């Protein structure tokens, strides 16, 4: 552990780290602000068009399994599906441009920010603590981006297509505003990113002795029911196909979390005997 530096020396190191973090974040904001219109056209608004890959995949899947077909997928051919967004507030597009820049810059630079903070904290940790912190850093980043990718390519398109086509009455046409689209977009991607942190949480709790692998075995049936409910909340389409497709990766996270946690020490010794 590094205990030779004075308090003021540590404070000076922290100030340097914070300046570097601000510099990286501002550089990302400037670059993303310039390219945000293209990012909107090619990435953010891609699920509003029928050529989005997941729509064609689910249309083919629905044809091969008619009993599981979602009406929102099978009723309209993927190629003809489209959603037109409207802007109902004068300054909304500008503020969404700015807020989206800030959010994307934070998501993209988060690993760099955490790493820079890590360079400040690292000298004060023991070697074993450094190994655990490094593993947590890598796992946390990988799982968050996997969750966000699942939200973008799977959860958000299915939710969007269902909600955009849902009508309480034929007399009430759906007009999707830009702000509501962006709120749903960021909420679902952030939610899925957090859900995919379940293995990291389980690993930390296992390291601290709060849970063991037997916990997952004991409550597996309860977890299946809870995860089905969670999948139904994340994707309100109500069709079995969508529910099943969202449930599978979430359940895999549960089993992966169980694998990361060590078994009970006494039980492991008995099995070895």
Image (cartoon, helix red, strand yellow):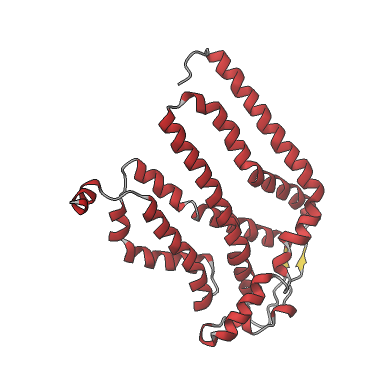
Expressed as whole percent of the image width and height from the top left, the position of residue 173 reads 70, 77
Expressed as whole percent of the image width and height from the top left, the position of residue 218 reads 27, 60
Question: For residue 172, which quarter of the picture?
Answer: bottom right
Let me know if residue 95 appears in the view: yes
Tell me: residue 169, above or below residue 98: below
Let me know if residue 88 appears in the view: no
Tell me: residue 39, above or below residue 124: below
Q: Is residue 33 left or right of residue 146?
A: right
Q: Is residue 47 left or right of residue 231?
A: right
User: At 41% from the left edge and 32% from the top edge, which residue is drawn?
Assistant: 128
User: At 30% from the left edge and 60% from the top edge, which residue is drawn?
Assistant: 217
Q: Is residue 2 left or right of residue 177?
A: left
Q: Nearer the viewer, residue 166 or 68?
A: 68
Tell me: residue 183, above or below residue 269: below
Expressed as whole percent of the image width and height from the top left, the position of residue 67 reads 51, 86
Q: Nearer the viewer, residue 159 or 74?
A: 74
> How many numbered discs sit on the rendered protein?
0
Tell me: residue 237, above or below residue 177: below
User: At 68% from the left edge and 62% from the top edge, which residue is drawn?
Assistant: 181
User: At 58% from the left edge and 82% from the top edge, which residue is drawn?
Assistant: 62
Outermost residue toward the front? 273
Expressed as whole percent of the image width and height from the top left, the position of residue 252 reads 44, 62
Question: For residue 168, which quarter of the picture?
Answer: bottom right
Quarter holding the N terminus is top left
């Amino acid at each position: 552990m590094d205990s030779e530096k004075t308090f003021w020396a540590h404070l000076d190191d922290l100030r340097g780290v914070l300046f570097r973090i601000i510099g990286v974040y501002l550089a990302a904001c400037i670059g993303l602000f310039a390219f945000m219109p293209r990012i909107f056209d090619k990435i953010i608004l891609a699920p509003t068009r029928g050529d989005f890959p997941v729509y064609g995949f689910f249309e083919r899947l629905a044809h091969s399994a008619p009993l599981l077909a979602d009406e929102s997928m099978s009723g309209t051919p993927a190629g003809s599906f489209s959603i037109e967004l409207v802007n109902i507030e004068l300054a909304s597009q500008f503020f969404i441009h700015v807020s989206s820049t800030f959010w994307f810059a934070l998501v993209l630079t988060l690993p760099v920010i955490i790493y820079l903070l890590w360079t400040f904290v690292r000298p004060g940790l023991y070697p074993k603590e450094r190994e655990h912190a490094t593993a947590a850093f890598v796992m946390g980043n990988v799982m968050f981006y996997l969750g966000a990718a699942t939200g973008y390519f799977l959860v958000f398109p299915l939710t969007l297509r269902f909600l955009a086509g849902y009508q309480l009455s034929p007399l009430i046409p759906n007009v999707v505003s830009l702000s509501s689209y962006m709120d749903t977009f960021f909420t679902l991607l952030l939610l899925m990113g957090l859900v995919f942190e379940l293995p990291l949480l389980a690993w930390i709790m296992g390291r601290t002795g709060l849970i063991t692998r037997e916990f997952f075995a004991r409550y597996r049936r309860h977890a299946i029911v809870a995860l089905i409910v969670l999948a139904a909340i994340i994707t309100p389409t109500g069709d079995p196909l969508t529910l099943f497709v969202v449930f599978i990766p979430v359940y895999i996270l549960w089993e992966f979390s169980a694998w990361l946690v060590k078994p009970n020490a006494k039980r492991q010794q008995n099995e070895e005997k």
